[in-house]
Amino acid sequence: MQTLSQFLASHPVGGAPSTSDWGNNNHVGVVPKVYKPHSILCRQDDENDTIFIVKSGWCLLYRELPDGERQILDTPLAGDTIGLRSMSGPRFASLMSITEVAVYEISARVLLENFLADGDLARRITRSLARLNAILAEHLVNIGRRNAICRTAHFLLELDERLTDVGLSAHEEYDCPLTQNELADILGMTPVHVNRTLRELRKADLVSFKSGHVKMFNRRNLVKLSGFEREYLT
Amino acid sequence: MQTLSQFLASHPVGGAPSTSDWGNNNHVGVVPKVYKPHSILCRQDDENDTIFIVKSGWCLLYRELPDGERQILDTPLAGDTIGLRSMSGPRFASLMSITEVAVYEISARVLLENFLADGDLARRITRSLARLNAILAEHLVNIGRRNAICRTAHFLLELDERLTDVGLSAHEEYDCPLTQNELADILGMTPVHVNRTLRELRKADLVSFKSGHVKMFNRRNLVKLSGFEREYLT
DNA sequence: CGATATGTTGAATACGGTCAAAAAGTGTGG
DNA sequence: CCACACTTTTTGACCGTATTCAACATATCG
């Protein structure tokens, strides 16, 4: 009988879903699941208390507006923990897969029971929340104070850093399943303008984003242009 | 000898700073302090590990950009906890007072030592982080997907809610020391346009913001206009 | 009282949005 | 393998919101 954090420690994240990990883990209250692309893992205003830890795949954390618009808050990647609200109460955001996604699901109630006995877990959760804070903060700066070009460049650099951390990016290249539509909702702009902005970045030989693949040609200048500072991700 | 959370529980927040509370509390690692307006409580990239719990007054949590611009991330109010990064590492934001501010200061290291033994404290911190997440998320939606009028209206409503929670707003009225300059940095727009937007809101008999005082004339329409939903604050 | 910060207004401009349509890509079933 | 439907990407023309720049008015404070 292992504790929750021992379990999590022994199940590293990143890479493609491997079936070997998906045994019977109910004894620690952790339910591994795999979702198909475009599944909704949880919906804003839901009252259930499930927490998700992403093992692999891409998803979107977003808020829906009454008029049908949405604002994407984050693109949780492998290893990220999502869904902890104030430990109870309705969710403030929805979570959707865009590729096949493997997650661990944990009930917040179970988590709370483990919380006190398990210091590592408390620290893991706290760190995850604090990290999301930092990411949201940087996204705010991005939308509030950078123009379309810098904003887009900055986000593509953030993705590179975060994917590199989990071994999914190397040599200034990575796969990214986001559509321009989704990019627009992330960056607070219209799909049309995202398209034009990507074209500009491509024409300037800085970075290209074609058919799900991002390739940086001049990372140094990209960093300079966007004012990217990686510290907020550490 | 009381625990950290017992101490915090017995020192309710809100209202003006009262000198009676500011005794010797070093025995629990909590240092009460009062800052003058426009003091910098901590600066982005600082390596120190102080955490702040606001007792009274207004401050700004913001990120500075290399070009001297800034984006305000939040206006922490009485009772809010600020400064927890990933429990270590450089800060991602600066904290500045704009009125006289009374805070409790706690070392993150001390906090961490208390964390395991003190379930209430763990929950308090977690809740605070989760709440800030929700607030930052809503600010993202605000800047990313609402125009100047709705954005401003939404933020003034958020302030009303949060101030009401700590007894600093009533009857759709509250004092607010923010300048239009600061409002601009909060809302991701220019001071000039903030000014024009406030004029519009005033002319439409929705809300006025004059000489540090906010008064709502038609809260119902303000809520409708901005799409405000208070749930994210609970 | 003068100095500095804050608020207000106007005119010109630009960045990004809107609307529309076509091209290219993707997936499915016949 | 192709035909069809659908999504995604791309491009053009026009428009509007918010920015920029500049000047002046009003508060605030030593």
Image (tube, coloured by chain):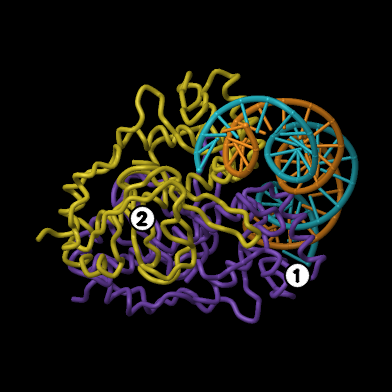
Chain colours: A purple, B yellow, C orange, D cyan
Viewer-closest of B165 and C5: C5
Q: Secondary structure at mark 1?
A: loop
Residue A206: mark in rendering: 1
**Snapshot quadrant of residue D21:** top right
Residue B181 placement (x, y as % from top left):
58, 41
- In the rendered structure, which amino acid carries the disc numbered 1? Leu
Q: What residue is shown with label 2?
A: B129
Label 1 to label 2: alpha-carbon separation? 36 Å
Quarter holding the N terminus of chain A?
A: bottom left
Q: Secondary structure at mark 2?
A: helix
Residue A87 placement (x, y as % from top left):
29, 52
Viewer-closest of A91 and A37: A91
Q: Is residue C1 above or below residue B59?
A: above
**Callout 1: residue from which chain?**
A
**Snapshot quadrant of residue A209:** bottom right
Q: Residues within 10 Å of mark 2 (few under 14, many from 20)?
A: many
- In the rendered structure, which amino acid carries the disc numbered 2? Leu
At 57% across and 22% down in the image, what residue appears? B202
Q: Is residue C17 above or below residue C30?
A: above
